[in-house]
Image (cartoon, rainbow, N blue to C red):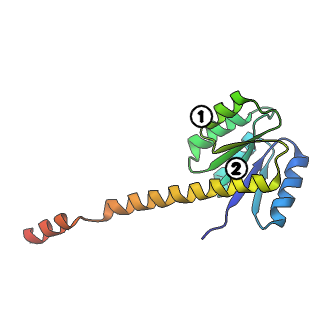
């Protein structure tokens, strides 16, 4: 089984460095991006399973970034993170496809629980996709019998 690959997206470099260090010490593979545009560039070239995404960033904000991620990389699970949490931004993020929503400063263990839950969700979805694809190539007993009768 593949290990979860996380990406932290935040304009606060101190948050990125500290959180990456803590997660790496716990054995996680962590990438960082200092904004939405950089996050999309990383996604274009690297496999990422779960993104921890800040809502309030200059330029491309978190909600705009979330929508772009879900459009181009629909299997990537996104957890929204904000120091300026409002019910409206949480609802908007969840409507746009975020898996969950946390307020800063988030406890690292709580963040990891949410990330693991998101990763499990992704693995279940990938398995459903594999099963659906394999069913396309499998023949029913009726189809096999019909082919046998025709030969």
Q: Position of residue 146 (x, y in %)?
A: 12, 65
How crowded pointer 1 is (Cα within 10 Å; few <14, some 14-19, many 20+) is rated as few
- Residue 12 in view, yes or no: yes
Judged from this view, the residue extending furthest toward the top is 88
Q: Position of residue 118 (x, y in %)?
A: 63, 53
In which quadrant of the rendered view does residue 19 lie? bottom right
Question: Mark 1 or mark 2, which is nearer the start of the sequence?
Answer: 2
Q: Are marks 2 and 1 in contact (CB under 8 Å)?
A: no
Drawn side of residue 56 relative to residue 40, left or right = right
Residue at horizontal 33 percent and vertical 59 percent from the top: 136
- Which is more toward the observer, 118 or 133? 118
Q: Position of residue 90 (x, y in %)?
A: 69, 34
Q: Of helix, strand and loop, which one carries label 1?
A: helix
For the image, the number of numbered tags is 2
Residue at horizontal 67 percent and vertical 58 percent from the top: 116
* Residue 51 badge: 2
Q: Position of residue 98 (x, y in %)?
A: 63, 41
Of marks 2 and 1, the one in the foreground:
1
Is 136 drawn above or below residue 145 in the view shown? above
Judged from this view, the residue extending furthest toward the right is 14
Residue at horizontal 77 percent and vertical 50 percent from the top: 8
Residue at horizontal 68 percent and vertical 38 percent from the top: 65
Task: Point out the image quarter for the C terminus.
Answer: bottom left
Drawn side of residue 3 relative to residue 24, left or right = left
Drawn side of residue 120 relative to residue 133, left or right = right
Q: CA distance from mark 2 to mark 1?
A: 17 Å
- Residue 49 in view, yes or no: no
Q: Which residue is mark 1?
A: 95
How crowded pointer 2 is (Cα within 10 Å; few <14, some 14-19, many 20+) is rated as many
């Amino acid at each position: 089984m593949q290990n979860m690959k996380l990406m932290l997206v935040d304009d606060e470099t101190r948050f990125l460095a500290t959180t990456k260090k803590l997660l790496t010490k716990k054995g996680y593979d962590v990438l960082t991006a200092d904004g939405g545009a950089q996050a999309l560039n990383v996604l274009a070239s690297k496999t990422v399973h779960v993104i921890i995404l800040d809502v309030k960033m200059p330029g491309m904000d978190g909600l705009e970034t979330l929508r772009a991620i879900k459009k181009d990389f629909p299997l990537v699970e996104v957890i929204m993170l904000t120091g300026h949490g409002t019910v409206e931004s949480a609802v908007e993020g969840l409507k746009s496809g975020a898996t969950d929503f946390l307020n800063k400063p988030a406890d690292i263990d709580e963040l990891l629980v949410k990330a693991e839950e998101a990763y499990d969700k992704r693995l279940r979805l990938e398995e459903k996709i594999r099963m659906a694809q394999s069913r396309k190539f499998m023949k029913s007993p009726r189809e096999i019998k019909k082919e046998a009768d025709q030969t």
